[in-house]
Amino acid sequence: MHTLVSMQSKEEILIKFGERVRKIRKEKGLSQEQLAFKADLHRTYIGMIERAEKNITLINIQKIAKALEISEYQLLKFS
């Protein structure tokens, strides 16, 4: 049971993070490709993050936040 709860929680945070990245990216008027270029990441990687298919590293969270011109805290602030 504990494993199931852990997996659900893990998937939930990936979904929330991906939705947050997409929302802010669109508010900034950036395409996935533009964000990827600014963050020095691959375009398909941004898509995978937004679809909750990738468990992102702290380093890449920092790159994306910098590319979006926001703090890491603002990027991780889920409502």
Image (cartoon, rainbow, N blue to C red):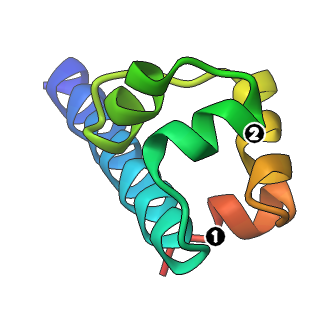
Nearer the observer, 78 or 23: 23
Q: Tell me the residue at 61%/74% (across/down).
A: 28
Looking at the figure, which quarter contains the N terminus?
A: top left
**Side of 17 where 76 appears, left or right:** right
17 shown above or below 51: below
Give residue 38's mark.
2
Give residue 77's mark.
1
Nearer the observer, 46 or 7: 46
Residue 72 position in % (x across, y down) = 81, 54
Sooner in the amino-acid sequence: mark 2 or mark 1: 2
Between tags 2 and 1, which lies in front? 2
Q: What residue type is labelled 1?
A: Lys
Nearer the observer, 65 or 73: 65
Q: In which quarter of the image is residue 40?
A: top right
Which type of secondary structure does the marked residue at label 2 adopt? helix
Q: Tell me the residue at 40%/49% (across/down).
A: 18
Q: Tell me the residue at 35%/44% (across/down).
A: 50
56 shown above or below 10: above
Residues tagged 2 and 1 counted as in contact (Cβ below 8 A): no
Q: Which amino acid does label 2 sit on?
A: Lys
Which type of secondary structure does the marked residue at label 1 adopt? loop
Nearer the observer, 26 or 52: 26
16 shown above or below 35: below
Residue 16 position in % (x across, y down) = 38, 57
Q: How many C-alpha atoms fall within 10 Å of the one at disc 2: few (<14), some, or many (≥20)? A: some
Q: Quadrant of residue 8?
A: top left
Residue 12 position in % (x across, y down) = 29, 47
Residue 45 position in % (x across, y down) = 45, 21
How far, Cα to Cα, is label 2 from label 1? 21 Å
